[in-house]
Image: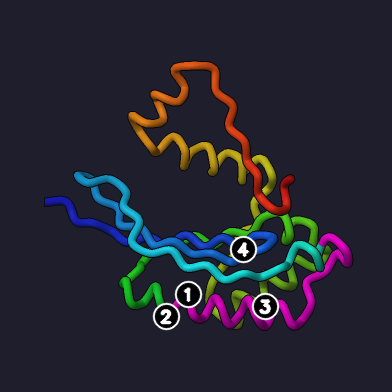
Amino acid sequence: MQKTKVFAAIDIGSYELAMKIFELSGTKGVRELDHVVHRLDLGTETYATGKISAHHVREIVEILKEYQDIMRGYEVKNYRAVATSAFRETKDKEIVMNLLEQQTGVAVQVLSNSEQRFINYKAIALRGERFHSFIEKPTAILDLGGGSI
């Protein structure tokens, strides 16, 4: 009998900090269990100043602590936390990432633009038969993320 696993994906984007909890099963595939979103406008600040303010860092810390509580409730053993455009544009991203990890225990990886696109395409391809029906004809995949428009 194959055991199911629970995985969390955290995305620190330009305009929201989101977490999805998934159940991964060899027989049933991937099933979304929960989706939590906090609106957080990092993009406007980062693109204008090149920095993330202390206020926003404190807010991210509080949200990540909340997400950790949720992950404990689902007994999540594995997670991945990524940051995208707003963090890529931040001059002090290493300092902010270290601070987040020290205060929350959550390690955040900043994705390059190409890494972000690749992960998005992989997520679309996970749709199995539905994905194959999409690509039978000429297909364009558009990403209309806040920081990447």
Q: Quadrant of the C terminus?
A: top right
Q: Earlier in the sequence, mark 4 or mark 2?
A: 4
* Magenta stretch bounds: 47-69
Q: Earlier in the sequence, mark 4 or mark 3?
A: 4
Give the number of the mark in front: 4 or 3: 4
Chief SS of the magenta region: helix
Separation (CA) of disc 1 from disc 2: 5 Å
- Residue 87, horizontal then vertical, whole percent: 72, 61
- Residue 103, horizontal then vertical, whole percent: 60, 83
Q: Earlier in the sequence, mark 3 or mark 2?
A: 2
Q: Secondary structure at mark 1?
A: helix
Is 62 left or right of 67, judged from the image as shown?
A: right
Residue at the top extreme, as displayed: 137
Circle 1 sits on which residue? Answer: 67
CB under 8 Å between discs 4 and 2: no
- Residue 29, horizontal then vertical, whole percent: 27, 45
- Residue 50, horizontal then vertical, whole percent: 86, 64
CB under 8 Å between discs 3 and 2: no
Q: Nearer the viewer, residue 146 or 5?
A: 146
